[in-house]
Amino acid sequence: MSTIEEVVQKAVKKQGKDPTGMLEIIRDVQAELGHVPDKAKSLIAAGMGLSKADLDGIVSFYHFFSEKPVGKYAVYLNNSAVAVMKGREAVARAFEQEAGCKFGQTTPDGIIGLHDTSDIGMNDQEPAAIINGVVFTGLTPEKVKDIVSQMRSGKDVTEMVKEYGDGLNGSEIVRSMVKNNIRKKGAVIFAPFEQGSAVKKAVRMTPADVIEEVKKSNLRGRGGAGFPTGMKWEFTRNNSKGKKAFVVCNADEGEPGTFKDRVILTELPRMLFEGMSVAGYAIGADRGILYLRAEYEYLLKYLQSVLDAMRKGNLLGRNVAGKKEFNFDIEIKLGAGAYICGEETALLESAEGKRGEPRNRPPFPAQYGYQGGPTSVNNVETLCAAARVMILGGEEFAKMGTFQSHGTKLLSVSGDCQKPGIYEVEFGISLQSLLDEAGGSDAMAVQVGGPSGKCVPAGEFGKKISFEELPTGGSMIVIAPGRDLLTIVHNFMDFFVEESCGWCTPCRAGNVILRERLEKIMARKGTESDLAELAQWCAVVKTMSRCGLGQTSPNPIATTIENFRSVYESRLQKGVGFVSEFDKDKAVEEYCRIAGRTPYTEGR
Protein backbone atom coordinates (compact mmCIF):
# COMPACT_ATOMS: atom_id res chain seq x y z
CA MET A 1 0.00 0.00 0.00
CA SER A 2 1.28 3.47 -0.87
CA THR A 3 2.36 5.82 1.90
CA ILE A 4 0.63 9.16 2.48
CA GLU A 5 3.68 10.88 1.01
CA GLU A 6 3.49 8.79 -2.16
CA VAL A 7 -0.23 9.34 -2.56
CA VAL A 8 0.09 13.12 -2.21
CA GLN A 9 3.11 13.32 -4.48
CA LYS A 10 1.29 11.39 -7.21
CA ALA A 11 -1.83 13.58 -6.93
CA VAL A 12 0.13 16.85 -7.04
CA LYS A 13 2.26 15.66 -9.96
CA LYS A 14 -0.86 14.66 -11.90
CA GLN A 15 -2.11 18.28 -11.79
CA GLY A 16 1.31 19.73 -12.58
CA LYS A 17 1.10 21.86 -9.43
CA ASP A 18 -1.68 23.86 -11.12
CA PRO A 19 -3.62 25.59 -8.32
CA THR A 20 -6.86 25.31 -10.29
CA GLY A 21 -6.53 21.52 -9.93
CA MET A 22 -6.66 21.65 -6.13
CA LEU A 23 -10.04 19.93 -5.83
CA GLU A 24 -8.80 17.11 -8.05
CA ILE A 25 -5.71 16.70 -5.89
CA ILE A 26 -7.80 16.46 -2.72
CA ARG A 27 -10.29 14.13 -4.42
CA ASP A 28 -7.52 11.78 -5.56
CA VAL A 29 -5.99 11.72 -2.08
CA GLN A 30 -9.33 10.95 -0.45
CA ALA A 31 -10.11 8.24 -3.01
CA GLU A 32 -6.81 6.54 -2.17
CA LEU A 33 -6.78 7.01 1.61
CA GLY A 34 -10.51 7.06 2.38
CA HIS A 35 -10.19 10.54 3.89
CA VAL A 36 -7.87 13.55 3.94
CA PRO A 37 -5.81 13.25 7.12
CA ASP A 38 -3.99 16.16 8.69
CA LYS A 39 -0.63 14.94 7.45
CA ALA A 40 -1.91 14.78 3.86
CA LYS A 41 -3.16 18.35 4.09
CA SER A 42 0.25 19.52 5.28
CA LEU A 43 1.97 17.70 2.42
CA ILE A 44 -0.46 19.04 -0.20
CA ALA A 45 0.03 22.56 1.14
CA ALA A 46 3.79 22.22 0.97
CA GLY A 47 3.67 20.77 -2.53
CA MET A 48 1.40 23.54 -3.80
CA GLY A 49 3.08 26.42 -2.03
CA LEU A 50 0.10 27.16 0.21
CA SER A 51 -0.42 27.37 3.95
CA LYS A 52 -1.86 24.51 5.95
CA ALA A 53 -4.73 26.85 6.86
CA ASP A 54 -5.62 27.13 3.16
CA LEU A 55 -6.00 23.38 2.92
CA ASP A 56 -7.99 23.20 6.14
CA GLY A 57 -10.36 25.75 4.70
CA ILE A 58 -10.85 23.97 1.40
CA VAL A 59 -11.30 20.46 2.83
CA SER A 60 -13.77 21.64 5.48
CA PHE A 61 -15.80 23.64 2.95
CA TYR A 62 -16.92 20.83 0.64
CA HIS A 63 -19.40 18.16 1.61
CA PHE A 64 -17.67 15.23 -0.08
CA PHE A 65 -14.25 15.91 1.45
CA SER A 66 -13.63 14.54 4.93
CA GLU A 67 -10.85 14.65 7.50
CA LYS A 68 -12.22 11.43 9.02
CA PRO A 69 -12.56 8.05 7.27
CA VAL A 70 -15.84 7.93 5.35
CA GLY A 71 -15.86 4.14 5.10
CA LYS A 72 -14.77 1.70 2.43
CA TYR A 73 -18.36 2.01 1.22
CA ALA A 74 -19.43 5.61 1.74
CA VAL A 75 -23.22 5.82 1.64
CA TYR A 76 -24.65 9.30 1.06
CA LEU A 77 -28.42 9.15 1.45
CA ASN A 78 -30.45 12.08 0.18
CA ASN A 79 -32.44 13.85 2.91
CA SER A 80 -34.37 16.36 0.77
CA ALA A 81 -38.06 17.04 1.39
CA VAL A 82 -39.15 14.89 -1.57
CA ALA A 83 -36.98 12.00 -0.39
CA VAL A 84 -38.74 12.20 2.97
CA MET A 85 -42.14 12.25 1.19
CA LYS A 86 -41.18 9.05 -0.64
CA GLY A 87 -40.07 6.99 2.37
CA ARG A 88 -36.56 8.13 3.16
CA GLU A 89 -36.90 7.53 6.92
CA ALA A 90 -37.67 3.82 6.54
CA VAL A 91 -34.70 3.45 4.19
CA ALA A 92 -32.42 5.27 6.64
CA ARG A 93 -33.52 3.02 9.51
CA ALA A 94 -32.84 -0.03 7.35
CA PHE A 95 -29.31 1.18 6.58
CA GLU A 96 -28.63 1.75 10.27
CA GLN A 97 -30.05 -1.61 11.30
CA GLU A 98 -28.22 -3.58 8.62
CA ALA A 99 -24.91 -1.71 8.88
CA GLY A 100 -24.87 -1.50 12.67
CA CYS A 101 -24.12 2.22 12.95
CA LYS A 102 -25.98 5.52 12.94
CA PHE A 103 -25.90 8.18 10.22
CA GLY A 104 -22.87 10.37 10.74
CA GLN A 105 -20.86 7.32 11.80
CA THR A 106 -18.67 4.62 10.28
CA THR A 107 -18.82 1.00 11.38
CA PRO A 108 -16.02 -0.01 13.80
CA ASP A 109 -14.41 -2.14 11.08
CA GLY A 110 -14.37 0.86 8.71
CA ILE A 111 -16.35 -0.97 6.06
CA ILE A 112 -19.52 1.13 5.89
CA GLY A 113 -20.01 4.83 6.49
CA LEU A 114 -23.49 6.36 6.62
CA HIS A 115 -23.83 10.03 5.70
CA ASP A 116 -26.72 12.43 5.18
CA THR A 117 -26.50 14.56 2.09
CA SER A 118 -28.56 17.29 0.49
CA ASP A 119 -30.35 16.95 -2.83
CA ILE A 120 -28.49 14.75 -5.33
CA GLY A 121 -30.59 15.53 -8.42
CA MET A 122 -32.77 12.40 -8.22
CA ASN A 123 -36.05 13.79 -6.88
CA ASP A 124 -38.02 11.99 -9.61
CA GLN A 125 -36.86 8.60 -8.28
CA GLU A 126 -36.52 8.86 -4.53
CA PRO A 127 -35.35 7.63 -2.08
CA ALA A 128 -31.90 7.75 -3.64
CA ALA A 129 -28.30 7.48 -2.50
CA ILE A 130 -24.77 7.76 -3.84
CA ILE A 131 -22.43 4.96 -2.81
CA ASN A 132 -18.80 5.42 -3.85
CA GLY A 133 -19.94 7.62 -6.72
CA VAL A 134 -22.58 5.15 -7.95
CA VAL A 135 -26.21 6.26 -7.84
CA PHE A 136 -28.92 4.01 -6.39
CA THR A 137 -32.52 5.05 -6.94
CA GLY A 138 -35.96 3.87 -5.79
CA LEU A 139 -34.53 2.46 -2.57
CA THR A 140 -36.61 0.35 -0.21
CA PRO A 141 -35.71 -1.37 3.10
CA GLU A 142 -35.56 -4.67 1.21
CA LYS A 143 -33.11 -3.27 -1.36
CA VAL A 144 -31.02 -1.80 1.44
CA LYS A 145 -30.71 -5.20 3.09
CA ASP A 146 -29.38 -6.68 -0.15
CA ILE A 147 -26.97 -3.76 -0.75
CA VAL A 148 -25.48 -3.95 2.75
CA SER A 149 -25.10 -7.74 2.43
CA GLN A 150 -23.11 -7.24 -0.78
CA MET A 151 -20.95 -4.60 0.91
CA ARG A 152 -20.17 -7.05 3.68
CA SER A 153 -19.12 -9.60 1.07
CA GLY A 154 -16.70 -7.11 -0.48
CA LYS A 155 -18.49 -6.76 -3.80
CA ASP A 156 -17.55 -3.86 -6.05
CA VAL A 157 -20.25 -1.22 -5.87
CA THR A 158 -20.66 -1.07 -9.66
CA GLU A 159 -21.64 -4.74 -9.62
CA MET A 160 -24.49 -4.02 -7.20
CA VAL A 161 -26.46 -2.20 -9.89
CA LYS A 162 -29.00 -4.77 -11.07
CA GLU A 163 -30.88 -2.72 -13.67
CA TYR A 164 -30.12 0.20 -15.97
CA GLY A 165 -32.11 3.29 -16.82
CA ASP A 166 -33.45 4.35 -20.18
CA GLY A 167 -31.66 6.18 -22.98
CA LEU A 168 -27.92 6.59 -22.63
CA ASN A 169 -28.09 5.72 -18.93
CA GLY A 170 -27.96 2.12 -20.06
CA SER A 171 -24.99 2.62 -22.41
CA GLU A 172 -21.78 0.71 -21.83
CA ILE A 173 -19.90 3.79 -20.64
CA VAL A 174 -22.57 5.11 -18.22
CA ARG A 175 -24.23 1.92 -16.93
CA SER A 176 -26.44 3.75 -14.46
CA MET A 177 -29.82 2.82 -12.99
CA VAL A 178 -30.92 6.47 -13.25
CA LYS A 179 -34.01 7.06 -15.37
CA ASN A 180 -34.55 10.11 -17.58
CA ASN A 181 -38.31 10.30 -17.04
CA ILE A 182 -38.79 12.64 -20.02
CA ARG A 183 -42.54 13.23 -19.97
CA LYS A 184 -42.95 16.00 -22.54
CA LYS A 185 -40.73 17.19 -25.39
CA GLY A 186 -40.88 20.70 -26.83
CA ALA A 187 -39.55 22.69 -29.76
CA VAL A 188 -36.25 23.90 -28.30
CA ILE A 189 -34.36 21.43 -26.14
CA PHE A 190 -35.84 18.10 -27.23
CA ALA A 191 -36.50 18.90 -30.87
CA PRO A 192 -34.28 16.97 -33.34
CA PHE A 193 -30.70 18.23 -33.31
CA GLU A 194 -28.10 17.64 -36.00
CA GLN A 195 -24.59 17.72 -34.57
CA GLY A 196 -22.55 20.59 -35.96
CA SER A 197 -25.54 22.54 -37.27
CA ALA A 198 -25.42 25.33 -34.69
CA VAL A 199 -21.70 26.06 -34.66
CA LYS A 200 -21.37 25.75 -38.45
CA LYS A 201 -24.05 28.35 -38.90
CA ALA A 202 -22.50 30.59 -36.23
CA VAL A 203 -19.03 30.66 -37.83
CA ARG A 204 -20.53 31.80 -41.12
CA MET A 205 -21.55 34.95 -39.27
CA THR A 206 -19.44 37.55 -37.48
CA PRO A 207 -19.27 37.30 -33.68
CA ALA A 208 -21.22 40.56 -33.47
CA ASP A 209 -23.94 39.11 -35.71
CA VAL A 210 -24.16 35.99 -33.53
CA ILE A 211 -24.71 38.16 -30.47
CA GLU A 212 -27.29 40.21 -32.35
CA GLU A 213 -29.16 37.04 -33.29
CA VAL A 214 -29.26 35.93 -29.66
CA LYS A 215 -30.48 39.38 -28.65
CA LYS A 216 -33.26 39.16 -31.25
CA SER A 217 -34.38 35.87 -29.69
CA ASN A 218 -34.82 37.56 -26.29
CA LEU A 219 -33.27 34.46 -24.73
CA ARG A 220 -33.00 34.90 -20.98
CA GLY A 221 -30.89 32.83 -18.60
CA ARG A 222 -32.62 29.60 -17.62
CA GLY A 223 -30.91 29.22 -14.25
CA GLY A 224 -33.48 31.40 -12.51
CA ALA A 225 -32.16 34.96 -12.65
CA GLY A 226 -33.33 35.50 -16.24
CA PHE A 227 -30.58 37.88 -17.36
CA PRO A 228 -30.62 38.44 -21.16
CA THR A 229 -28.09 36.07 -22.69
CA GLY A 230 -27.16 38.23 -25.69
CA MET A 231 -26.49 41.18 -23.40
CA LYS A 232 -24.25 39.07 -21.18
CA TRP A 233 -22.26 37.87 -24.19
CA GLU A 234 -21.97 41.43 -25.48
CA PHE A 235 -20.68 42.72 -22.15
CA THR A 236 -18.12 39.91 -22.02
CA ARG A 237 -16.93 40.48 -25.61
CA ASN A 238 -16.57 44.22 -24.99
CA ASN A 239 -14.26 43.45 -22.08
CA SER A 240 -12.28 40.73 -23.87
CA LYS A 241 -10.14 42.89 -26.15
CA GLY A 242 -6.55 42.06 -25.37
CA LYS A 243 -7.57 39.67 -22.58
CA LYS A 244 -8.11 35.94 -22.37
CA ALA A 245 -11.85 35.29 -22.20
CA PHE A 246 -13.70 32.19 -20.97
CA VAL A 247 -17.06 30.46 -21.34
CA VAL A 248 -18.16 28.68 -18.17
CA CYS A 249 -21.15 26.35 -18.09
CA ASN A 250 -22.83 26.13 -14.71
CA ALA A 251 -23.81 22.47 -14.32
CA ASP A 252 -24.05 22.65 -10.54
CA GLU A 253 -27.82 22.28 -10.27
CA GLY A 254 -28.04 21.97 -6.50
CA GLU A 255 -31.51 23.45 -5.98
CA PRO A 256 -33.60 20.70 -4.33
CA GLY A 257 -36.13 19.42 -6.81
CA THR A 258 -34.13 20.27 -9.92
CA PHE A 259 -32.81 17.53 -12.21
CA LYS A 260 -33.33 18.86 -15.76
CA ASP A 261 -29.60 19.44 -16.35
CA ARG A 262 -28.95 15.82 -15.40
CA VAL A 263 -31.12 14.72 -18.33
CA ILE A 264 -29.52 17.19 -20.76
CA LEU A 265 -26.05 16.03 -19.72
CA THR A 266 -27.10 12.43 -20.33
CA GLU A 267 -29.01 12.73 -23.59
CA LEU A 268 -27.91 16.03 -25.17
CA PRO A 269 -24.29 16.79 -24.24
CA ARG A 270 -23.37 17.49 -27.89
CA MET A 271 -26.01 20.20 -28.06
CA LEU A 272 -24.72 21.68 -24.80
CA PHE A 273 -21.08 21.65 -25.90
CA GLU A 274 -22.04 23.15 -29.24
CA GLY A 275 -23.85 25.94 -27.42
CA MET A 276 -20.64 26.57 -25.47
CA SER A 277 -18.72 26.75 -28.76
CA VAL A 278 -21.19 29.27 -30.15
CA ALA A 279 -20.73 31.35 -26.99
CA GLY A 280 -16.96 31.05 -27.29
CA TYR A 281 -17.04 32.28 -30.87
CA ALA A 282 -19.32 35.18 -29.93
CA ILE A 283 -17.27 36.49 -27.01
CA GLY A 284 -13.80 35.72 -28.40
CA ALA A 285 -12.90 32.88 -26.01
CA ASP A 286 -10.74 29.90 -26.84
CA ARG A 287 -11.52 27.91 -23.72
CA GLY A 288 -14.71 26.62 -22.13
CA ILE A 289 -15.20 25.02 -18.73
CA LEU A 290 -18.04 22.73 -17.73
CA TYR A 291 -18.38 22.88 -13.95
CA LEU A 292 -20.05 19.57 -13.13
CA ARG A 293 -21.57 18.97 -9.70
CA ALA A 294 -19.96 16.15 -7.74
CA GLU A 295 -23.25 14.26 -7.56
CA TYR A 296 -23.08 13.76 -11.34
CA GLU A 297 -19.59 12.30 -11.32
CA TYR A 298 -21.08 9.08 -12.71
CA LEU A 299 -21.44 10.95 -16.03
CA LEU A 300 -17.85 12.25 -16.14
CA LYS A 301 -16.20 9.57 -18.31
CA TYR A 302 -19.11 9.63 -20.71
CA LEU A 303 -18.97 13.41 -21.10
CA GLN A 304 -15.22 13.26 -21.67
CA SER A 305 -15.78 10.66 -24.40
CA VAL A 306 -18.26 13.00 -26.09
CA LEU A 307 -15.68 15.80 -26.03
CA ASP A 308 -13.08 13.46 -27.55
CA ALA A 309 -15.47 12.56 -30.37
CA MET A 310 -16.23 16.23 -31.06
CA ARG A 311 -12.51 16.98 -31.28
CA LYS A 312 -12.11 14.22 -33.84
CA GLY A 313 -15.05 15.65 -35.77
CA ASN A 314 -13.49 19.13 -35.89
CA LEU A 315 -16.21 20.55 -33.67
CA LEU A 316 -13.67 21.36 -30.96
CA GLY A 317 -9.98 22.16 -31.08
CA ARG A 318 -8.25 24.16 -33.80
CA ASN A 319 -10.13 25.85 -36.65
CA VAL A 320 -13.49 24.67 -35.29
CA ALA A 321 -16.03 23.80 -38.00
CA GLY A 322 -13.47 24.89 -40.60
CA LYS A 323 -13.35 28.48 -39.34
CA LYS A 324 -9.77 29.65 -39.61
CA GLU A 325 -8.31 30.89 -36.34
CA PHE A 326 -11.38 29.94 -34.31
CA ASN A 327 -9.77 27.68 -31.75
CA PHE A 328 -11.98 26.51 -28.91
CA ASP A 329 -11.84 23.58 -26.52
CA ILE A 330 -13.68 22.50 -23.39
CA GLU A 331 -12.53 20.93 -20.15
CA ILE A 332 -14.58 19.54 -17.28
CA LYS A 333 -14.04 20.56 -13.67
CA LEU A 334 -15.77 18.55 -10.98
CA GLY A 335 -17.23 20.14 -7.87
CA ALA A 336 -17.08 18.56 -4.43
CA GLY A 337 -20.52 19.18 -2.95
CA ALA A 338 -21.54 22.77 -2.13
CA TYR A 339 -24.91 24.32 -3.01
CA ILE A 340 -23.41 27.82 -2.90
CA CYS A 341 -21.31 26.94 -5.96
CA GLY A 342 -24.44 27.37 -8.03
CA GLU A 343 -23.87 31.10 -7.52
CA GLU A 344 -21.71 32.15 -10.47
CA THR A 345 -18.88 33.86 -8.59
CA ALA A 346 -18.69 31.07 -5.99
CA LEU A 347 -18.51 28.63 -8.89
CA LEU A 348 -15.57 30.55 -10.37
CA GLU A 349 -13.74 30.45 -7.04
CA SER A 350 -14.32 26.70 -6.84
CA ALA A 351 -13.21 26.17 -10.45
CA GLU A 352 -9.98 27.93 -9.50
CA GLY A 353 -9.42 25.36 -6.75
CA LYS A 354 -10.51 27.45 -3.78
CA ARG A 355 -13.34 27.55 -1.28
CA GLY A 356 -16.53 28.28 -3.17
CA GLU A 357 -17.29 31.59 -1.52
CA PRO A 358 -19.11 34.31 -3.49
CA ARG A 359 -17.09 37.30 -4.63
CA ASN A 360 -18.01 40.91 -4.07
CA ARG A 361 -19.64 42.45 -7.14
CA PRO A 362 -18.72 44.58 -9.02
CA PRO A 363 -16.61 43.59 -10.82
CA PHE A 364 -18.93 41.12 -12.50
CA PRO A 365 -17.68 37.94 -14.24
CA ALA A 366 -18.03 39.65 -17.63
CA GLN A 367 -15.32 42.03 -16.42
CA TYR A 368 -13.27 39.85 -14.07
CA GLY A 369 -14.14 36.18 -14.06
CA TYR A 370 -12.20 32.93 -14.25
CA GLN A 371 -8.54 33.63 -13.47
CA GLY A 372 -9.27 37.32 -13.88
CA GLY A 373 -10.40 37.07 -17.50
CA PRO A 374 -13.75 38.24 -18.91
CA THR A 375 -16.10 35.29 -18.45
CA SER A 376 -19.61 34.44 -19.53
CA VAL A 377 -21.22 32.06 -17.03
CA ASN A 378 -24.30 30.38 -18.48
CA ASN A 379 -26.63 27.63 -17.34
CA VAL A 380 -26.80 24.23 -19.11
CA GLU A 381 -30.30 24.82 -20.48
CA THR A 382 -29.40 28.36 -21.58
CA LEU A 383 -26.52 27.15 -23.73
CA CYS A 384 -28.67 24.46 -25.34
CA ALA A 385 -31.30 27.11 -26.11
CA ALA A 386 -28.58 29.32 -27.63
CA ALA A 387 -27.64 26.47 -29.97
CA ARG A 388 -31.29 26.24 -31.02
CA VAL A 389 -31.40 30.02 -31.62
CA MET A 390 -28.58 29.58 -34.13
CA ILE A 391 -30.57 26.91 -35.96
CA LEU A 392 -33.98 28.60 -35.92
CA GLY A 393 -32.89 32.23 -36.02
CA GLY A 394 -33.60 34.76 -33.31
CA GLU A 395 -36.90 36.02 -34.68
CA GLU A 396 -38.35 32.53 -35.07
CA PHE A 397 -37.29 31.59 -31.55
CA ALA A 398 -38.90 34.75 -30.15
CA LYS A 399 -42.31 33.72 -31.54
CA MET A 400 -42.59 31.13 -28.79
CA GLY A 401 -43.68 32.07 -25.28
CA THR A 402 -44.94 35.32 -23.82
CA PHE A 403 -44.06 38.99 -24.14
CA GLN A 404 -41.24 38.81 -21.57
CA SER A 405 -40.50 35.07 -21.67
CA HIS A 406 -39.54 33.59 -25.03
CA GLY A 407 -38.96 29.99 -26.01
CA THR A 408 -39.58 26.97 -23.80
CA LYS A 409 -38.70 25.99 -20.25
CA LEU A 410 -37.58 22.65 -18.88
CA LEU A 411 -39.36 21.83 -15.64
CA SER A 412 -38.34 19.20 -13.09
CA VAL A 413 -41.59 17.98 -11.55
CA SER A 414 -41.51 15.85 -8.41
CA GLY A 415 -43.29 15.24 -5.12
CA ASP A 416 -46.94 14.23 -4.82
CA CYS A 417 -47.74 13.56 -8.47
CA GLN A 418 -48.33 10.47 -10.59
CA LYS A 419 -45.82 11.29 -13.35
CA PRO A 420 -42.68 12.94 -11.94
CA GLY A 421 -40.04 13.85 -14.49
CA ILE A 422 -39.01 16.37 -17.12
CA TYR A 423 -41.50 18.54 -18.98
CA GLU A 424 -40.50 20.93 -21.75
CA VAL A 425 -43.28 23.50 -21.93
CA GLU A 426 -43.71 26.74 -23.80
CA PHE A 427 -43.55 29.77 -21.53
CA GLY A 428 -47.06 30.90 -20.65
CA ILE A 429 -48.52 27.54 -19.63
CA SER A 430 -50.55 27.75 -16.42
CA LEU A 431 -49.40 25.95 -13.32
CA GLN A 432 -52.74 24.11 -13.26
CA SER A 433 -52.18 22.80 -16.80
CA LEU A 434 -48.78 21.47 -15.77
CA LEU A 435 -50.30 19.78 -12.72
CA ASP A 436 -52.98 18.18 -14.90
CA GLU A 437 -50.29 16.72 -17.16
CA ALA A 438 -48.18 15.49 -14.25
CA GLY A 439 -51.07 13.91 -12.37
CA GLY A 440 -51.06 16.35 -9.48
CA SER A 441 -54.34 18.18 -10.05
CA ASP A 442 -55.44 17.90 -6.42
CA ALA A 443 -52.30 19.57 -5.02
CA MET A 444 -52.54 21.79 -1.96
CA ALA A 445 -49.46 23.76 -2.99
CA VAL A 446 -46.52 23.76 -5.38
CA GLN A 447 -43.04 24.86 -4.38
CA VAL A 448 -42.08 26.75 -7.55
CA GLY A 449 -38.36 27.29 -8.02
CA GLY A 450 -37.31 24.97 -5.19
CA PRO A 451 -36.78 26.07 -1.59
CA SER A 452 -35.38 29.42 -2.74
CA GLY A 453 -38.53 30.05 -4.77
CA LYS A 454 -42.18 30.46 -3.79
CA CYS A 455 -44.78 28.21 -2.20
CA VAL A 456 -47.85 28.74 -4.38
CA PRO A 457 -51.35 27.98 -3.04
CA ALA A 458 -54.10 26.30 -5.07
CA GLY A 459 -55.84 29.63 -5.54
CA GLU A 460 -52.95 30.82 -7.69
CA PHE A 461 -52.61 27.74 -9.93
CA GLY A 462 -54.03 29.77 -12.80
CA LYS A 463 -50.84 31.84 -12.94
CA LYS A 464 -48.52 31.37 -15.91
CA ILE A 465 -45.04 29.90 -15.72
CA SER A 466 -43.01 32.84 -16.97
CA PHE A 467 -40.54 35.44 -15.78
CA GLU A 468 -43.37 37.93 -15.30
CA GLU A 469 -45.70 35.71 -13.22
CA LEU A 470 -44.10 32.53 -11.87
CA PRO A 471 -40.35 32.54 -12.54
CA THR A 472 -38.47 29.32 -11.86
CA GLY A 473 -35.09 27.78 -12.50
CA GLY A 474 -36.96 24.53 -13.07
CA SER A 475 -37.83 22.92 -9.73
CA MET A 476 -41.54 22.22 -9.21
CA ILE A 477 -42.33 20.28 -6.03
CA VAL A 478 -45.97 19.17 -5.77
CA ILE A 479 -47.43 19.07 -2.26
CA ALA A 480 -50.66 17.14 -1.68
CA PRO A 481 -53.41 17.92 0.82
CA GLY A 482 -52.70 16.32 4.18
CA ARG A 483 -48.97 17.03 4.13
CA ASP A 484 -47.62 18.90 7.15
CA LEU A 485 -46.44 22.01 5.32
CA LEU A 486 -44.31 23.23 8.22
CA THR A 487 -42.36 19.97 8.25
CA ILE A 488 -41.47 20.59 4.61
CA VAL A 489 -40.53 24.20 5.40
CA HIS A 490 -38.34 22.95 8.25
CA ASN A 491 -36.57 20.56 5.88
CA PHE A 492 -35.85 23.48 3.55
CA MET A 493 -34.44 25.56 6.42
CA ASP A 494 -32.22 22.67 7.49
CA PHE A 495 -30.89 22.70 3.94
CA PHE A 496 -30.08 26.42 3.98
CA VAL A 497 -28.44 26.26 7.41
CA GLU A 498 -26.26 23.39 6.18
CA GLU A 499 -25.39 25.02 2.84
CA SER A 500 -24.60 28.57 3.97
CA CYS A 501 -20.95 29.29 3.23
CA GLY A 502 -20.76 31.16 6.54
CA TRP A 503 -19.16 34.30 5.14
CA CYS A 504 -21.80 36.82 6.29
CA THR A 505 -23.59 36.93 9.64
CA PRO A 506 -27.15 37.51 8.33
CA CYS A 507 -27.03 34.22 6.44
CA ARG A 508 -24.80 32.24 8.80
CA ALA A 509 -26.66 33.15 12.00
CA GLY A 510 -29.93 34.45 10.59
CA ASN A 511 -31.00 31.14 9.07
CA VAL A 512 -30.36 29.38 12.37
CA ILE A 513 -32.55 31.94 14.14
CA LEU A 514 -35.28 31.47 11.53
CA ARG A 515 -35.19 27.71 12.04
CA GLU A 516 -35.31 28.03 15.81
CA ARG A 517 -38.29 30.41 15.69
CA LEU A 518 -40.03 28.03 13.29
CA GLU A 519 -39.38 25.10 15.64
CA LYS A 520 -40.92 27.01 18.53
CA ILE A 521 -44.13 27.50 16.55
CA MET A 522 -44.12 23.87 15.39
CA ALA A 523 -43.83 22.79 19.06
CA ARG A 524 -46.96 24.86 19.80
CA LYS A 525 -45.03 27.18 22.09
CA GLY A 526 -45.30 30.17 19.78
CA THR A 527 -47.45 33.24 20.19
CA GLU A 528 -48.71 35.88 17.78
CA SER A 529 -45.68 38.00 18.63
CA ASP A 530 -43.39 35.06 17.75
CA LEU A 531 -45.02 34.83 14.31
CA ALA A 532 -44.58 38.57 13.79
CA GLU A 533 -40.95 38.28 14.85
CA LEU A 534 -40.42 35.37 12.45
CA ALA A 535 -41.61 37.52 9.55
CA GLN A 536 -39.32 40.36 10.68
CA TRP A 537 -36.30 38.05 10.75
CA CYS A 538 -37.13 36.93 7.20
CA ALA A 539 -36.86 40.54 6.04
CA VAL A 540 -33.57 41.04 7.88
CA VAL A 541 -31.89 37.97 6.38
CA LYS A 542 -33.18 38.75 2.87
CA THR A 543 -32.03 42.37 2.82
CA MET A 544 -28.75 42.08 4.73
CA SER A 545 -27.22 38.93 3.22
CA ARG A 546 -24.30 39.20 0.83
CA CYS A 547 -25.35 36.84 -1.96
CA GLY A 548 -28.32 35.10 -3.49
CA LEU A 549 -28.33 32.21 -1.02
CA GLY A 550 -29.06 34.41 1.99
CA GLN A 551 -31.30 36.70 -0.03
CA THR A 552 -33.61 33.78 -0.90
CA SER A 553 -33.14 31.39 2.04
CA PRO A 554 -36.02 32.93 4.07
CA ASN A 555 -38.44 32.28 1.18
CA PRO A 556 -39.76 28.93 2.50
CA ILE A 557 -40.95 30.69 5.65
CA ALA A 558 -41.80 34.08 4.14
CA THR A 559 -43.93 32.72 1.28
CA THR A 560 -45.79 30.20 3.45
CA ILE A 561 -46.57 32.90 6.03
CA GLU A 562 -47.91 34.97 3.15
CA ASN A 563 -49.92 32.23 1.47
CA PHE A 564 -50.62 29.73 4.27
CA ARG A 565 -50.78 31.91 7.36
CA SER A 566 -53.54 29.80 8.88
CA VAL A 567 -51.16 26.84 9.07
CA TYR A 568 -48.92 28.86 11.37
CA GLU A 569 -51.80 30.39 13.34
CA SER A 570 -53.22 26.93 14.07
CA ARG A 571 -50.07 26.13 16.06
CA LEU A 572 -50.02 29.34 18.11
CA GLN A 573 -51.10 29.82 21.69
CA LYS A 574 -53.72 32.54 21.45
CA GLY A 575 -54.09 35.35 23.99
CA VAL A 576 -50.68 34.66 25.53
CA GLY A 577 -47.88 37.21 25.48
CA PHE A 578 -44.93 34.83 25.85
CA VAL A 579 -44.25 31.12 26.20
CA SER A 580 -40.80 30.06 27.33
CA GLU A 581 -38.91 27.50 25.32
CA PHE A 582 -36.64 26.70 28.26
CA ASP A 583 -37.17 23.24 29.76
CA LYS A 584 -35.53 23.15 33.20
CA ASP A 585 -35.78 19.39 33.56
CA LYS A 586 -34.19 18.79 30.18
CA ALA A 587 -31.44 21.33 30.89
CA VAL A 588 -30.17 19.37 33.93
CA GLU A 589 -30.99 15.89 32.62
CA GLU A 590 -27.51 15.10 31.26
CA TYR A 591 -25.74 16.48 34.35
CA CYS A 592 -27.93 14.41 36.67
CA ARG A 593 -27.34 11.29 34.61
CA ILE A 594 -23.56 11.70 34.83
CA ALA A 595 -23.66 12.60 38.54
CA GLY A 596 -26.13 9.86 39.39
CA ARG A 597 -28.58 12.32 40.91
CA THR A 598 -32.34 12.70 40.67
CA PRO A 599 -33.39 15.87 38.84
CA TYR A 600 -34.91 18.52 41.06
CA THR A 601 -36.18 21.82 39.75
CA GLU A 602 -38.05 24.60 41.42
CA GLY A 603 -41.77 24.03 41.80
CA ARG A 604 -41.66 20.23 42.05
Image (cartoon, rainbow, N blue to C red):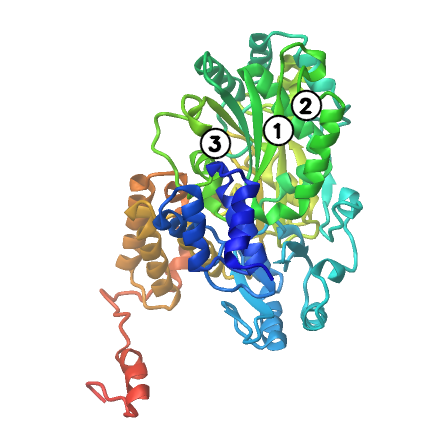
Comes first in the chain, label 1 or label 3: 3
Count the labels in the image. Answer: 3
Q: Is residue 484 left or right of residue 382?
A: left
Image depth: mark 1 or mark 3 in front? 1
Tell me which corner region of the image, top left, top right, bottom left or bottom right, holds residue 586. Answer: bottom left
The disc placed on residue 330 is 1
* Distance between mark 1 and mark 3 Cα atoms: 25 Å
Q: Which amino acid type is marked by label 2? A: Leu
Q: Is residue 85 above or below residue 410?
A: below
Q: Tell me what residue is drawn at x 33 percent, y 39 percent.
A: 546
Instruction: Name the quadrant containing residue 573.
Output: bottom left
Cα–Cα span, label 1 and label 2: 8 Å
Where in the figure is residue 113, as x and y percent of width and height? 56, 67
Count neighbours of disc 3 (C-alpha within 10 A) and say few if under 14, some if 14 to 19, many if 20 or more. few
Q: Percent position (x, y) of residue 200? A: 71, 15
Q: Is residue 256 visible?
A: no
Q: Earlier in the sequence, mark 3 or mark 2?
A: 3
The residue at the point 68 percent across, 11 percent down is 323
x and y, in percent, of residue 543 in the image: 31, 39
Residue 225's tag is: 3
Query: 241 or 223, which lies in front?
Result: 241
Specify whether residue 372 is in view.
yes
User: Quadrant where the N terminus lies?
Assistant: bottom right
Query: Which of marks 2 and 1 precedes in the sequence?
Result: 2
Q: Is residue 491 above or below residue 556?
A: below
The residue tagged 2 is: 316
